[in-house]
């Protein structure tokens, strides 16, 4: 019994000392342009700007109507496509949330409940020269990239010493053909609320590289110190065309 207790203590100690780590995933694109660290698609009608920076990544984008007349995004006929698999932005279902209520009358408490039903928007109206922001539920990655620190296919790319402590940053790179992750944002846009006469935007992205490093390294060089504790500004790795996964090793 004492033996197992000792092993448990050792395991808990090791977990408490585990280093905070981060993998940073950088996406490239086959048909959008990189503008101020974000992928942007633009034509005479619309400008779409992407921002993936979130834990596990998110397909987040804003749509700007450049015209003098409104247009509509038809979510029923639009999709997020993940490694060739179609995922729907719009599902014909109604979500109901419950909330409790309490009413007081002459010292007596009457308990009750209320429900609120919400149906997702099937078509979004975007007025002339205005912006709409969409934050879909889809994550870009579900797990860490495996075996990133082995010597088989990975290599040291840089030394970094924000606090006079050298660190090794590992990286694996891909081209379009070898990339393990490809995803697309497929939007159906019409000038009629009832659909018809669609034009389509099909923006494609793929995983270009994965970096792994200590969390401290990813913060960059401290901009100052507060009681000998480093204070950081924006991470040099943070941008709209990358996302990350945090973990402990």
Image (spheres, rainbow, N blue to C red):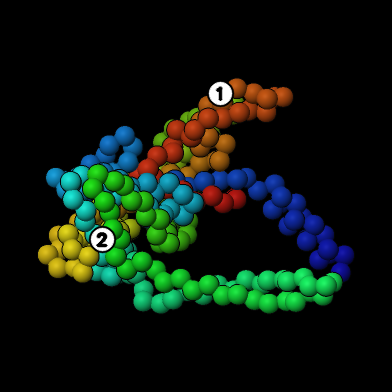
What is the crowding at mark 2: few (fewer than 14 residues within 10 Å), some, or many (at least 20)?
many
> Going by the picture, which residue comes out furthest to the front?
106
Which residue is at the front of the view, 142 or 97?
97
Please state the horizontal and vertical placement of residue 82, each as a whole percent of the image: 32, 64
Pointer 2 residue: 73
Which residue is at the front of the view, 157 or 101?
101
Q: Earlier in the sequence, mark 2 or mark 1?
A: 2
Which residue is at the front of the view, 109 or 23?
109
Please state the horizontal and vertical placement of residue 93, each as a whole percent of the image: 41, 77
Please state the horizontal and vertical placement of residue 40, each as a whole percent of the image: 26, 44
Write the residue at 72% across / 71% down.
Answer: 102
Judged from the image, the secondary structure of the residue bearing numbered disc 1 is loop
Q: Is 219 above or below relative to 100?
A: above
Mark 2, mark 1: which one is toward the viewer? 2
Please state the horizontal and vertical placement of residue 13, each as a whole percent of the image: 75, 51
Q: Is residue 94 left or right of residue 113?
A: left
Q: Is residue 71 left or right of residue 238?
A: left
Judged from the image, the secondary structure of the residue bearing numbered disc 2 is strand
Query: In 3D space, how far apart are the residues under numbered discs 2 and 1 (Cα atoms)?
Result: 43 Å
Q: Is 65 above or below relative to 161?
A: below
Q: Is 91 above or below relative to 83?
A: below
Which quadrant is home to the N terminus?
bottom right
What is the crowding at mark 1: few (fewer than 14 residues within 10 Å), some, or many (at least 20)?
few
Pointer 1 residue: 223
Q: Is residue 29 visible?
A: no
């Amino acid at each position: 019994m004492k033996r197992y207790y000792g092993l448990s203590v050792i395991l808990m100690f090791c977990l408490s000392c585990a280093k905070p780590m981060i993998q940073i995933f950088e996406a490239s694109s086959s048909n959008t342009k990189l503008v101020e660290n974000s992928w942007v698609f633009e034509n005479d009608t619309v400008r779409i700007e992407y921002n993936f920076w979130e834990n596990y990544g998110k397909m987040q984008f804003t749509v700007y109507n450049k015209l003098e007349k409104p247009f509509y995004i038809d979510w029923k006929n639009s999709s997020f496509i993940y490694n060739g698999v179609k995922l729907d932005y719009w599902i014909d279902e109604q979500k109901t949330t419950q909330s409790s209520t309490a009413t007081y009358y002459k010292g007596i408490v009457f308990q009750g409940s209320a429900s609120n039903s919400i149906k997702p928007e099937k078509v979004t109206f975007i007025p002339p020269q205005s912006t709409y922001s969409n934050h879909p539920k889809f994550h870009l990655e579900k797990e860490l990239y495996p075996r990133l620190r082995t010597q088989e296919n990975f290599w040291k790319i840089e030394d970094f010493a924000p606090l006079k402590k050298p660190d090794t940053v590992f990286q694996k790179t891909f081209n379009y053909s070898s990339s393990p992750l490809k995803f697309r944002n497929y939007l159906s846009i019409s000038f009629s609320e009832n659909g018809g006469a669609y034009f389509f935007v099909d923006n494609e992205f793929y995983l270009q590289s994965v970096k792994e490093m200590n969390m401290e390294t990813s913060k960059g060089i401290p901009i100052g110190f507060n009681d000998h504790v480093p204070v950081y500004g924006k991470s040099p790795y943070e941008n709209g065309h990358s996302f990350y996964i945090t973990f402990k090793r």
